[in-house]
Image (spheres, rainbow, N blue to C red):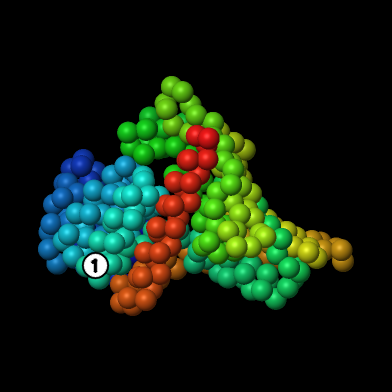
Amino acid sequence: MIPAILEQGRLYRLAGIASRDGDKADAWAREFDTQAFRSYESLVDAGGLEAVYIPLPNALHAPWIEHALNKGLHVLVEKSLACSVGEVTSLNRAARDKGLALVENFQFRFHSQLAEIKRMVDNGVIGELRCVRSSFGFPPFPDPDNIRYRKDLGGGALLDAGAYPIKISQIFLGADLEVKAASFCIDEQRRVDIWGGGFLRQKNGPLFSEIAFGFDHHYQCSLELWGSRGKLSANRIFTAPPGFRPEVVIETSEGKEVLTLEADDHFAGILEYFSRAVHDPDIAGDEYAQNINQARLIHEFRIRTDE
């Protein structure tokens, strides 16, 4: 994210980097020619800032979003925005009341491959959409103390990997979804969910989404859109890096076509969008609604696993 911030010089100036480890703060500040802050609070309280980017573990998002909003700062925060629907709702209401942008950092929304896939679906390339399937999972992390395995830090696969297919389900099926079935596998020693899946359905329509995610899987980063006349598949929907040309596969009764799309930089895309949200209350307002709906679906997912 930092290189993308530096490349957006017409929109941003990197004012500083904060770390609890002073040596790390100094090293990264030298790397990117900016100021080092030896605590998060010292950066947020520094003055002269307009916005902060928060890539902390999930459990630390809510307190530092609140601190930043109380200082009058716009916030770009990593997903998941917070650990509970109550926290997310409260934070977005506070941002709205203060007239501040609060954007959850799903960069893939701003990669041109998603816009191209939506265009093809809208143009009827696969006929009428019938269902969405999406998976995001990867092999175990080599570090046993990885923050994603830490319950006290808001770890677990749902908030990390599962958030992506839940988000893309809304992009294609609309916000008015409900979780009808969900399953978790819990690591009893770590007390966090390691993998899972679920079924989301439109409340007022026939369409549905099947999702899967996990931390101990063969790598998957997929989207499949099944239609009345064909199927569209993409295998790097969430993580296409800058310079990478993603492939989309179209299958119909007429055969199979593999399309290689243009490379793009979704880090630049989210930063351009965040700037617009800062200056446009309508965009900021849409983000509040999206943030709360995302948290609602994650909450429903948890409830379904307890039934």
Q: Residue 158: x, y in percent?
A: 48, 42
The answer to which image quadrant residue 201 occupies is bottom right
Q: Which residue is mark 1?
A: 97
The answer to which image quadrant residue 14 occupies is bottom left
Residue name at image x 62 percent, y 38 percent: 218
Nearer to us in this view, 206 or 194: 206
Q: Residue 115: x, y in percent?
A: 58, 70
Where disc 1 sits, the SS reads: helix
**Count of labels in the image:** 1
In the picture, measured across the screen, residue 58 lies left or right of residue 13, that is right
Residue name at image x 47 percent, y 40 percent: 302
Q: Is residue 95 visible?
A: yes
The correct choice, above or below, for 255 with respect to 40 in the image is below
In the picture, measured across the screen, residue 38 lies left or right of residue 278, that is left
Assign the N terminus to one quadrant of the image: bottom left
Q: Residue 96: x, y in percent?
A: 28, 67
